Amino acid sequence: MSRKPLIYVLVAVLAAAAITIGVVASRAQGSTATLPAIAPAQLLANMAATQQTTKSISGDVTWSNGLIPGSELSGLLSGGSGAAPSSLTGLLMGGSGRLWAQQGSGLRLESQGSGADFVVVAGRSGVWSYSSATDTATQYGLPAGARAGTSPSPVPTAMDPLTTITRTLQSFATTGTLSVSGQTSVAGRQSYLLTVTPTSSITTLGSLQVAVDGKTFVPLRVQVFARGDTTPTLSAGFTSVSYGSIVANLFTFSPPAGATVRHSALPTPQGLTGGMHSQSRPAAHGAPLTLAQARVKAAASGLVLTAPAPGSLASSLPFAGATVMPSTKGQGDTAILRYGTGFGSVVLVESQGAAGATANLQQTLAGLPHGLVGATTVAGVPGYELSTSLFNVVAWQQGKVTAVAAGMVPQATLRAFVAAV
């Protein structure tokens, strides 16, 4: 197991919230309520209608990631505090810059650092990034294992942060309580505060709060709070904003003369991020399988699942379906099993590893910052834990099976789940 895939697993867990929240300034306090009262359902409806009328948005943005205390992600993802990121994953650390997004055209983000810049351009010609620190341009294709024949060019709505946030809120409404919790000023615009509070009693997520422009109904700021915290753990949003049209050539990219050009797959492990909040929807490869069906399908490729039987777990983590995906490298299938509902759920990923995978797993995790990962024992074999205020992860190797359990649940809850495997 190489270092990069495991880092991408880590990034996906951290990114499950970050990709969802899109683009945030510091939390405003004491804003005077000047907008008319509005019900949560009507505010969501107005946001959905905005997707048809708001074609462009641009402005200065800032984002932060407080998941890992002491900036442990700094050395892992971007090479040091204050430096411009040199990859897409480096953006997860936090930063500031400028964003342009236009329906039918694409998205552009420019992040500034000390002495260097990082640019991401996603248009119909594909997805590119460029780091001035390394003078390297990277063209991104489909993630490893994605279906052949699928165009790597971004679908305009998929690259639209406004659409993404609105659809995410609509999805989360089934697993949380929606409320308009107040008003505030964001990027000079009086805004409603739309808050989602999870219904699950075991999740580490306290709330998801979105500041919505009171005139245009465009989401301008998103904040994710861990349970019991009053400071946002994840935040992203505008500090200045414009809805004027954007020149189309901003969404095209050509590598600077003399730059090193690389090609890479987008760092998005299949299935892991998609299973965190919506276990009831059909899987991409068909309807969710029962545990018995998943065992049979995985066994056909030599993967013996160690997944716990439904009756061996706490009632708060009922089995919610499985997906078994064929391997692209002939090393066996990958099984993704989901337990629990809503935000209080756990995803268990099991895959067939090659001989020596245990040593590779240990070497990979040993290379991560010490404050990020700790050692543990799972059924008598070495394992590793990643613990944050929002997400917890346990990874271990049992024979040739590599297993990763992750969820927005307390560390003790995840440990109890793993003990039942």
Image (spheres, rainbow, N blue to C red):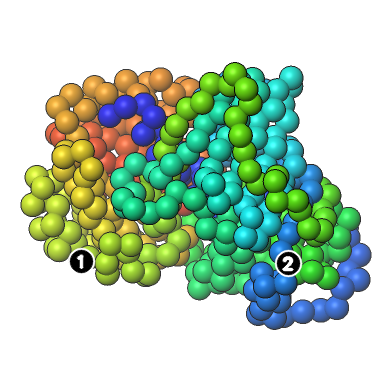
Residue 136, label in figure: none
Q: Is residue 38 above or below residue 83?
A: below
The residue closer to the viewer here, 277 or 346, is 277
Q: From the viewer's perspective, tell me whether residue 328 is left or right of residue 368.
A: left
Q: Is residue 346 above or below residue 181?
A: above
Residue 290, label in figure: 1
Task: Specify which label sits upstream in the sequence, 1 or 2.
Answer: 2
Write down the quadrant of residue 144 in the picture. Answer: top left
Placement of the N terminus among the 4 image quadrants: top left
Write down the quadrant of residue 206 in the picture. Answer: bottom right
Seen at 77% across and 79% down, the residue is 38
- Find disc 2 in the rendering and name its residue: 54
Crowd class of label 2 (few under 14; some 14 to 19; many from 20; radius 10 Å): some
Seen at 70% across and 51% down, the residue is 248
The percent coordinates of residue 264 (x first, y second) are 43, 34
Whether residue 274 is visible here, answered yes or no, is yes
Residue type of the residue flagged with mark 1:
Thr
Whether residue 226 is visible here, answered yes or no, is no
Asked which secondary structure carries label 1, the reply is loop
Q: From the viewer's perspective, tell me whether residue 125 is left or right of residue 323.
A: right
C-alpha span from label 1 to label 2: 43 Å
